[in-house]
Amino acid sequence: MKRIAVRFSRTPAFPSIEVQSKKSKGKGDKGTMECQQEKNLARCNCTYDPCSRKGICCQCIAYHLKMRQLPGCCFPKDAEATYDRSFEHFARLVQKGAI
């Protein structure tokens, strides 16, 4: 399975993801994280109703990056509603000062 590393800032456009760490079980074991889907759902602004990844941020991010997109939580409400999640759209919004 391909792993991706994602860093999050604490700006309004990039909400933090809730995870709960589990203790490491020994040498070489980096531990695991437990998804806090209910807490993440409270901040998820995705308006795509049939989305099966809502609140499961790691799956959402992996899916959108594979599609050369950013998840909806990276966009202001009005921009998210357009469903244009492309890097280019994000860059245009940054240039306009909308993000």
Image (cartoon, helix red, strand yellow):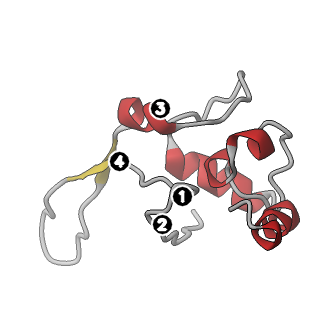
Residue located at (86% from left, 40% from top): 82
Precedes in sequence: disc 3 or disc 4: 4
Foreground mark, 2 or 1, reads 1
Between the residue at mark 4 and the residue at mark 2, the CA separation in whole angstroms equals 12 Å
Precedes in sequence: disc 2 or disc 3: 2
Between the residue at mark 3 and the residue at mark 1, the CA separation in whole angstroms equals 14 Å
Check disc 3 and report the residue beneath it. Answer: 41
Check disc 2 and report the residue beneath it. Answer: 8
Between the residue at mark 3 and the residue at mark 4, the CA separation in whole angstroms equals 10 Å
Foreground mark, 4 or 1, reads 1
Question: 12 and 67: which one is in front?
Answer: 12
Residue type pointed to by label 4: Glu
Check disc 1 and report the residue beneath it. Answer: 14
- Counting from the top left corner in percent of width and height, residue 31 is at 24, 62
Between the residue at mark 2 and the residue at mark 1, the CA separation in whole angstroms equals 6 Å
Q: Are marks 4 and 1 in contact (CB under 8 Å)?
A: no
The answer to whether 87 appears left or right of 61 in the picture is right
- Which element carries disc 4, helix, strand or loop? loop
